[in-house]
Structure formats: C-alpha cells, structure tokens
Image (cartoon, grey):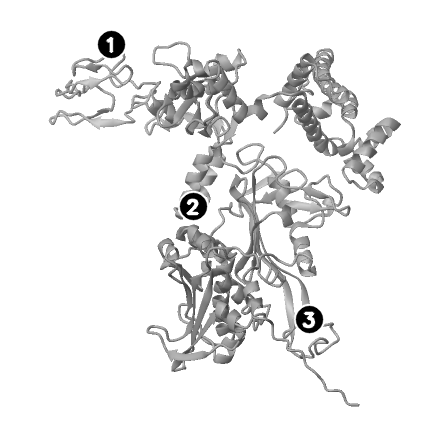
C-alpha cells in the first residue's frame, strides 16, 4: 500500500519576530548593529571594485519631545552601493545572513530584526542603486504581521529621493507603548544625550574613523575617533632581570593559518578540496593574525584601563580586563593579577582579532573557541602574571612584560614612569593631583602640542626625580653665577637686569631696582603716586608712605597668609581632600555637600613677622580650601594627624551652617566632637584605625616584599640555606607552596635558583638575617651602610655592625612574634607598629 508523503510547514509563527525583540540588548549595541550593516555595504563595494566617494553614515535620532508625543524616527542612512530586490529580501529575513563571517561586521537578518524591533514597531527600508531609475521600499510592521500571520511584504518601487543616487536608508518609528518590555528602549538611547552617543560611537569605531575612510554623523555632528592617552614607545622603565621595559609594544603577527569553507565556515582538513559539510569548493585560507599594541596609560584610573578588542573595525569589547588580568589555574581557581596593589590600573591597548568568532549579537567573542584561546595565550601567556606563580618564568608575552615593569606606582618619576613633584616635607617625590591629570588629559583631547604627544607630561616625570634647584644666571662679562632675581653681578657689577634712566638727557642703562641713576643722580621714582593698600593688613596708606602706617610692612610686601600666595606654593593632596563631604546631622538629614580641597604647602605657613608658623589655614567660601604645613611641630613632635585637624575645621563649618540644631531638642548630639568623629570615620577610618588585624596584615605584606627580593640577593648561598633549614621549617615551606598552588615537584630546581625563599615562614627570615646581615644592608633591603670604608679599624667596624644588626633584629623579632602569637594587647600592637615603621623608613624604593 502506497503511503502519501506529508510535509510539515516549517514557516515560523509570526510571533517569532516579536519574540526576537525581547532578546537582551543595550540601546547603543542595537544602533551599532545597524551601523555595522552600513559599513559592510562599503566593504562589499570595495571588494567588488565599486568606488564610493566620501563614504558617509548619517544617523538621526528623535528628540525627547518627539518621544513624549509618540512621534519622530530613528534614521540610519548610508551612501553605499545600495541593494537589488533579491539582496533586500534576504537582508530582512529573520535568521538569514548573506555576509561572510571573515570580512564583515553586520549580521543582516537576525541582528537587523532584533535591533530595529527593539526600537520600534515599524521599520521602513529604502535602498537604491546608482544605475537604477527607481528605489525599492519595504515596510516591516511587526504588529500587522503578527495579526495577519502573513510574511508576504509588498515591495514598492518608488522614485529616487532627492539627493540620493545610491545607498540605503532605514527608518524606525511607532515606539512601543507603555507596558511593553521595549517601551523605554529608544528613550534610554536618547537620554544618553547626543554628545555621549557620539563619544561612544567614536570609541567603538575608532579604527574606522581614525583612518578617515568613513564618516559617521549623529544629528549632523561628526563622531570623533577615540584615542588612548599612552606613553610613547621610546619611554621605558628598568627592572632587574628584565632590563628596559618600554611603555608601548606594537605587533602584527600571524600565529596560524586555517582552511575554512567560504560558504558555511566549516574547518577543512589540509588534504580535502571541498567542504565535507556543504560540498562547496570555495575554500579560504584564514590567517590568525593578531595586530595592535599594548602599553601604559599616562595616568592610572579605577575603571579607565584595559584592552580594546576589535573585529573588522568595531570594538567588540571595550577596556577588557578579565581576559588579561585574571588567570584561572588548573584547579579552576581564579587568581586576580592586576591591579592587586591598589584600585588603579594603567595597562591599556587596542588589539585586532578579525579571525576570532563572536556571538550572534556581537556582545563578546566566543571565548570557548580555539581561536580565542590561542590569541589570549599569545597576548598574556599561559600563566599568572605574578612572577612567583607556577609557570610564570616561561611567560614571554607582551602583557607579562608590561606587568613586570608597571605593576604598580611605588614612586613618581622615571623609576615607575609617573608624574609628580618633589615634596619638601618628606624630601621625596609625590604624585601630582588628579586635578592636574584631568587638566592635562583635556589638553590631550584638544590635541595641544606637548600634551597630545607626551613631552609636557614627561616634564612632570622628570620634575619628580630631583628637588628643584635655585636657578642661576651666568654673567656675560665674568661668567660668575648669580641668583636669577639679582639685577647686577655680585662679582663684577655688570648689569644683568636693566632699565633706561628716565632722564631724557641721560638714558644710561641702570639696574632695574635702582631708585636713582648713578650717572645723573635723577630719582627713578615717579613723582605722581597714588594711595596704596597694604597687602598684609589691608590698611589704606598715603602715596608718600613707604611703609604701612598700621603694620609697618614695606609697600608692595606680599601677604604670606593670603590664598593667592599659598596657592602658588602648595600642591593639592587627593588623599586628604574630601570631595562632596556630607554627614548625617542630629535630625537625621544629611548636611549639604561641600568640597574640601587640601593643599600641602612647600613653605612654612606664617605671617611676615611671625617666628613660629601655624599648622594650617582655612578659607571657607563655596568650597573649603585648607592649606596645611606637614612639617609643623604639631604634626612632627606632637603626633597629631593632619586628618584630625582637617576634620575639626570642617566640623566647625558644618556646625555653624546648621546652628538651628543647637537647641535643647538635639542637646549632646549636635556637637563639634560628634561631627568631627563622623568625618574621620567616613573618610579615613581604614587609614587611621590601627587595629591588630591591620598591623598584622601590613607586617605580612612587608615580609612578602622581603621574600620577593631574597632569591636574587641570596642566589649564591641559596642551596646552603635550604640545607640548613630544619624539618619543621621545610614542612611549613611546603604548606605555603601548596596554599599558593606552587608546583612542589620543582622544589629541587627551586633550591638551586633560590625561588623556594618565596615560600619560607617569616621566622626563617630572621635566621637568615642573623647569618647573612650584610646582604640586607647597603641597598639589599635597606639603604643603610653596613660594609663601610676601610678607614675604620676592624674593632670599631665590628662594634658598629653588631649595633646595627641588633636594632634591626629586635624589630624583626617583634614582628615575627606578633604574627605567631596573634596578640591583641594594645602595648604590644603599638610596639610592633613602631618596629614596622622603623624598618620601612629605610627600605629601598
């Protein structure tokens, strides 16, 4: 009996199109999908030999007022080659992708339907080709399709719009009503603001825009290509064992070649001449090329760092961090590599991975693909970036190299390639204020010479490396050195800074400071003088007075307590400043936010005739500006913290601004001490609270820093030290290795190289110090002379060395015992803190 063959109708229900619009997607990503398709049209034209003059993508977005009235459109227009009727039909069919996955960005079909459907219910596509007399227009009304269950869309030939000879226009309208999952989608895009949209598109399409191949306009204004603010490749730091590590590395490397089907993208074995999946003979050789650069940003930031990953001109991942700065070991344990010494990072880069597949919405690369894994292995290696982790000694990647040089900023200046200034108080470099960084970055964005390149930034790096020297001027007559402000040479009397005599019959050049001409004797002081105001006390004085009648200061004397004078001789401290300071008041309401700007002065704060300076001076206006002298006796001898004084001044300000709370109702709660405590607790609790746990943590960090240096310092005696360790010490070392996922099978190799010293217990360090103290001094660990010149006799030298050794050994023992016995007694904690502070003072930077 013959059976009748039945066929299933495989046409999807029209609700599938509606369901597609519920796919999670961000508004900017949806807009980028449509921009990608426009860019692909230019790419297709280039590959087929069609020349497009001045490629342009114009985006028009509605206004908020349009959205409120349910009017307006989202329009994406390009002047590409346009599409035939057949191409247009395929491009809007859900799930169809006519683009090859190797040379293009867009995914016409699925990406097109999701993106347009997220914005609105109705999409109109109009396309026209150069040699065609009419354009093609198709309207996709999702609600109409869903109601009619009909996929047949009429194709309307229309007259070419004025001014469009070729290209494609997509218009989206009819916003989704309230209650629909996408009702706020287009509003979110508009609420970003046009400058933000242009900025984000400039970041995502920086490669395309920087080459000036294609222009992208948003409501008539161009999107500018984003540029990373990084150091030039000729800048570098030097690290022991690594030599010079440059601030930027460029690369263009092919790490492999694949044979792929040009039709279905299947992988083709070398011996086959056609695709085993679709039988196509269109075989392509796809190069696994990794091109781009990685380098060091000129400033560090808590979020603005990482690697931009780009595919065919579009950034798929912006500031990617996880792939490069986290490592998952063989036990599935995630190791955070960077940044781990603070919250700020500065490793950045742009890497093109055109061969690595992406997910269908281009939110990310397919991280399980072998192409991705090979690329990441090339860029960051197959180990943790930390040199003490297993396999790190075999890591030769670019990211690993940058990590060794720029892992953290210990010291501004050339040593760590960071901007700063010389701090008089501590006699060491300090980093510049982040306000200065913002100012320099703005000038970089404006492409000002010296700021766009890094020459002006580099001056701040050099400034941090040496204390400012008093500028000297060479006398052209006798070559003697004179201070810059001197107008005559102290040696020969030659005029360095001069002026002509005001006597028209004389006109001799005389010293600039001269009150009378030494040639003709005429006074150089103008006869007509105005009354003057004393800068110091504000008293108004008659013109004839040379000194203030109130304070006796000479005319023109600068007020050393004025804000203008102090600001010229101070540097802002980000650590002590409090942006938007606000505390909860006694009535449960937060005080009005106020910016507290703290500046560290380079000179003592004192009035013109004052012998003893003052610790700080405050200017309270719309913001609170505090000028503080950290060298003052209050901070140096009385051990008062600057934070306490700042909090007291701010507390007084908040107290005065809220005197309405001084009544009986809030008695005991609206007080200076309560407000000061809230400020200290909210801003500096971690810094000021010296708990046993914090001391113990800092002690452990200090010992870890010593361990990191021991393999290099003790490599000649490492094997002997290993043999001298007792069983208990070796057992503790192995436990530490296992806890840190180190490979104990390499212990024999570590014995010879000294790497086992990274895992020893702290008590072993004191044993090593007793036997080899000379290794720790003279720049080993501490900048303390130990092996002094031979002018001293052996007896005197030996006694001095014993004294130095015992002082440092006692401090080390205090810290080891504190960790071992976990004491919480206040006296012991304070003693340990003093020992730690003492040992850290002379540690080499």
**Rendering coords of residue 696 (x, y %):** 69, 24
What distance separates the C-alpha of mark 2 from that of mark 1?
Answer: 50 Å
**Rendering coords of residue 208 (x, y %):** 48, 61
- Up the image or down, 283 lies above or below 56; here it is below
**Rendering coords of residue 294 (x, y %):** 57, 50
**Mark positioned earlier in the residue sequence (2 or 1):** 2
- Up the image or down, 689 lies above or below 48; here it is above
On residue 266, the disc is 3
Residue 548: name its quadrant.
top left
Query: Callout 2 environment at 10 Å: few (<14), some (14 to 19), or many (20+)?
Result: many
**Rendering coords of residue 63 (x, y %):** 37, 56
On residue 444, the disc is 2
Query: Callout 1 environment at 10 Å: few (<14), some (14 to 19), or many (20+)?
Result: few
- Residue 674 seen by the camera: yes
Q: Residue furthest left?
A: 505
Marker count (numbered): 3
In the image, 258 versus 754, the foreground residue is 258
Instruction: Give the foreground label among 2 and 3.
Output: 3
- Up the image or down, 362 lies above or below 738; here it is below
Q: Are marks 3 and 1 in contact (CB under 8 Å)?
A: no
In the image, 264 versus 155, the foreground residue is 155
On residue 550, the disc is 1
């Amino acid at each position: 009996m013959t059976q009748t063959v039945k066929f299933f109708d495989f046409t999807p229900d029209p609700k599938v199109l509606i369901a597609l619009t519920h796919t999670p997607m961000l508004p900017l990503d949806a807009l980028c999908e449509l921009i990608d398709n426009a860019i692909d049209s230019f790419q297709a034209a280039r590959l087929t030999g069609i020349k497009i003059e001045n490629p342009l993508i114009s985006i028009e977005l509605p206004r908020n007022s349009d959205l409120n009235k349910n009017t307006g459109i989202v329009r994406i227009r390009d002047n590409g080659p346009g599409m035939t009727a057949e191409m247009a039909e395929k491009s809007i069919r859900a799930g169809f992708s006519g683009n090859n996955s190797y040379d293009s960005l867009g995914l016409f079909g699925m990406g097109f339907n999701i993106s347009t459907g997220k914005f609105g219910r109705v999409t109109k596509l109009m396309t026209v080709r150069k040699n065609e007399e009419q354009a093609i227009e198709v309207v996709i009304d999702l609600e109409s399709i869903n109601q009619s269950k009909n996929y047949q869309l009429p194709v309307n030939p229309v007259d070419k719009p004025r001014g469009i000879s070729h290209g494609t226009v997509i218009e989206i309208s009819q916003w989704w009503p309230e209650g629909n999952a996408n009702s706020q989608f287009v509003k979110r895009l508009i609420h970003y603001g046009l400058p933000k949209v242009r900025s984000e598109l400039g970041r995502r399409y920086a490669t395309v825009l920087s080459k000036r191949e294609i222009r992208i306009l948003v409501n008539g204004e161009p999107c500018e290509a984003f540029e990373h603010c990084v150091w030039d490749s000729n800048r570098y730091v030097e690290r022991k064992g690594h030599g010079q590590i440059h601030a930027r590395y460029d690369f263009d490397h092919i790490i492999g070649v694949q044979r792929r089907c040009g039709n279905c993208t299947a992988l083709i074995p070398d011996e086959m001449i056609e695709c085993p999946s679709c039988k196509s003979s269109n075989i392509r050789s796809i190069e696994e090329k990794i091109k781009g650069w990685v380098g060091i940003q000129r400033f560090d930031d808590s979020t603005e760092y990482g690697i931009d990953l780009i595919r065919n001109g579009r950034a798929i991942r912006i500031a990617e961090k996880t792939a490069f700065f986290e490592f998952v070991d063989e036990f599935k344990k995630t190791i955070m590599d960077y940044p781990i010494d603070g919250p700020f990072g500065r490793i950045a880069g742009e890497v093109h991975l055109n061969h690595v597949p992406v997910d269908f919405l281009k939110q990310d690369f397919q991280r399980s693909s072998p192409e991705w894994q090979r690329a990441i292995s090339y860029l960051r290696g197959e180990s943790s970036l930390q040199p003490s982790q297993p396999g790190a000694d075999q890591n030769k990647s670019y990211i690993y190299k940058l990590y060794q040089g720029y892992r953290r900023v210990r010291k501004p200046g050339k040593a760590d390639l960071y901007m700063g200034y010389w701090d008089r108080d501590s006699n060491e470099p300090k980093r510049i204020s982040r306000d200065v960084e913002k100012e320099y970055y703005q000038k970089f964005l404006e492409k000002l010479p010296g700021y766009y390149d890094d020459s002006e930034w580099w001056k701040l790096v050099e400034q941090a490396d040496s204390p400012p020297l008093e500028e000297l001027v060479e006398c052209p007559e006798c070559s003697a050195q004179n201070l810059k402000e001197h107008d005559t040479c102290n040696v020969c009397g030659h005029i360095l800074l001069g002026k002509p005599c005001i006597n028209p019959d004389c006109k001799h050049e005389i010293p600039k400071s001269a009150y009378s001409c030494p040639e003709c004797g005429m006074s150089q002081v103008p006869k007509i003088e105005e009354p003057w105001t004393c800068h110091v006390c504000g008293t108004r004085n008659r013109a004839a007075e040379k000194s203030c009648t109130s304070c006796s200061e000479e005319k023109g004397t600068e007020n050393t307590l004025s804000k203008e004078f102090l600001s010229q001789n101070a540097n802002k401290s980000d650590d002590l400043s409090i942006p938007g300071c606000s505390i909860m008041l006694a009535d449960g309401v937060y005080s009005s936010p106020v910016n507290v700007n703290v500046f560290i002065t380079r000179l003592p704060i004192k009035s013109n005739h004052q012998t003893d300076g003052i610790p700080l001076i405050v200017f309270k206006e719309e913001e609170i500006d505090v000028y503080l002298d950290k060298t003052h006796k209050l901070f140096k001898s009385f051990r008062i913290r600057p934070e306490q004084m700042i909090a007291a001044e701010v507390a007084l300000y908040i107290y005065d601004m809220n005197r309405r709370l001084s009544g009986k109702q809030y008695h005991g709660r609206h007080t200076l001490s309560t407000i000061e405590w809230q400020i200290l607790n909210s801003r500096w609790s971690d810094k000021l609270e010296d708990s046993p746990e914090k001391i113990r943590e800092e002690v452990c960090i200090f010992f870890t820093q010593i361990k990191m240096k021991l393999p290099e310092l003790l490599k000649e005696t490492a094997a002997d030290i290993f043999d001298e360790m007792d069983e208990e010490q070796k057992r503790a070392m192995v436990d530490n290795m296992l806890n840190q996922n180190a490979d104990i099978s390499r212990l024999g190799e570590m014995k010879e190289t000294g790497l086992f010293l990274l895992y020893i217990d702290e008590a072993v360090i004191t044993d090593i110090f007793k036997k080899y103290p000379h290794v720790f001094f003279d720049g080993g660990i501490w900048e303390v002379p130990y092996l002094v010149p031979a002018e001293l006799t052996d007896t005197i030298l030996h006694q001095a060395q014993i004294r130095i050794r015992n002082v440092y050994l006692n401090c080390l023992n205090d810290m080891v015992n504190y960790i071992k016995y976990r004491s919480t007694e206040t006296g012991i904690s304070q003693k340990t803190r003093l020992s730690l502070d003492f040992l850290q003072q002379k540690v080499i930077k």
